[in-house]
Amino acid sequence: MNVKSANRENNKLTVNVEIESEVFEAGINKAYLKNRKYITVPGFRKGKAPRKMIENLYGAQVFHSDAVEEIFPDVFKEAVLDQGWKTVGQPSVTDMNVRDDKSLELTIETELYPEVELGQYKGVEAPKAAVAVTDEMVEAELDRKANEVARIVTVERPAQEGDTVVIDYKGLKDGVAFDGGTAEGYELRLGSHTFIPGFEDQLIGAVAGDEKELNITFPEDYHAKELAGVPVVFCVKVHEVKETQVPAKDDELAKDVSEFDTLDELRADLRKNLEQKQQEEADRSFENALMEKVAESAKLELPAAMIEEELDNELQNFDYQLRSQGMSLEQYSKMLGGDLSRFRTSMRPSAEKQVRLRVVLNAIADAEGIEATQEDLDAEYQKLAEQYGMEIEKIKAAVPAAEITTDLKVRKARDLIVSQAVATAPVEE
């Protein structure tokens, strides 16, 4: 095989190669043997016609396209991959010419991994929020803990906001019950705003045994079009009024909701957890801001194939999540009022950012000579095995080492950027 020319324009490589007649002939024969069982030739049983008979009947070029498919992997490897070109996406044959001497000339096009001109990635400045847990935040968390062990008891008094009423209700539109407007034994917390406006307000003051007619008008933007803006009547019977009794914030509460004996110990632990959560959020936001700056400062042109591959992966992962909840990706996109292509388009900006950042981080890793050691690789495999509860050998078979090595290098590049970054005070809004 002879590579006549190789021209790169941006991220596209065009290679023109000459292939010896012997190689092409071997490809034609493989194509013939693979396809002859599907070809009908008069006078011969299916699959038994000689190659020459088929070529005479259907033309000498009948197996040429399939022959190119047979030899293409070896041709592409020798003409492109072995020359050091790093490709992305699927290559294609844009032109083929069979010469008189039965040799073959092919023009191959493929997209290349982008070249990157790095911008600033050391000493990058970004705002970072300070950790500031207030007494009010701690008390709010303590209130949440208290509400988790609150008791709900039936009371013999008029319902107040915050109470729970047990009701039967039937919604009538022009005197006729409508779909979705009827329930029995429903527990409704007054003030929760889970029902349409006006419903809960009209039950304040109700007592067990009351039967009430509530005049309600559905909101103009209500999701059921046949009810949007429509006045209806709800016939409601109140069975019970229940009060939520929240325990006092004292040492007994601390014992009930934690391993601590005193309220002061519980408050101190809540503060510590809130500070840790705030610190993690501040670190995450700081790192994201740094990555965005580093990615934007680099110069590169992303191949379309890399973006499409990222979109495929993101959609596949999202589809797995949806199917675990009993829904398909197609159903989800239709539920949002669009088709799958529109949904894919909406994800494109995010996919482009992810690909751009990954390419830039790879370039930084190369520029800094960052490598993933065997110890790093073994530790990552062990971590994945523990995470998924699988044997480490099965993890190794499922996840290629090259993929993990790339991820580890990218992670180390992120760590390098963060370690040399400069945190600035956030701009007050």
Image (cartoon, rainbow, N blue to C red):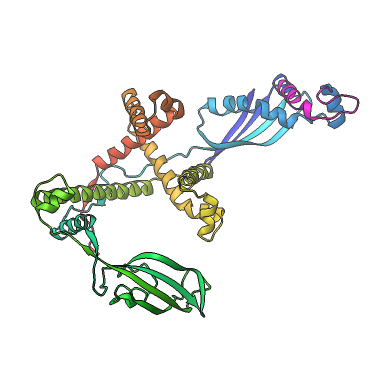
Residue shown at 59% from the left, 36% from the top: 91
Residue 417 lies in quadrant: top left
- Please name whichever residue, 247 or 73, is drawn nearer the observer in this view of the structure: 247
Percent coordinates x, y for residue 286 in the rendering: 27, 49
Residue that protrudes farthest toward the top in the picture: 22
Residue that protrudes farthest toward the right in the picture: 43
- Residue 248 relative to residue 277: left or right: left
Residue that protrudes farthest toward the front in the picture: 209
Is 158 located above or below residue 118 in the figure?
Answer: below
Q: Which residues are magenta?
A: 26-48
Q: Quadrant of the C terminus?
A: bottom left
Residue shown at 37% from the left, 74% from the top: 199
Residue 234 lies in quadrant: bottom left
Residue 325 makes an appearance in the image:
yes
Residue shown at 53% from the left, 42% from the top: 305
Percent coordinates x, y for residue 400 in the rendering: 44, 28
- Residue 411 relative to residue 261: left or right: right
Percent coordinates x, y for residue 209 in the rendering: 33, 74
Residue 181 painted magenta = no
Percent coordinates x, y for residue 361 in the rendering: 37, 39
- Please name whichever residue, 365 or 229, is drawn nearer the observer in this view of the structure: 229
Is 8 located above or below residue 376 in the figure?
Answer: below
Q: Quadrant of the N terminus?
A: top right
Residue 110 makes an appearance in the image:
no
- Residue 83 relative to residue 32: left or right: left
Residue shown at 24% from the left, 50% from the top: 282
Residue 29 painted magenta = yes
Number of on-image labels: 0
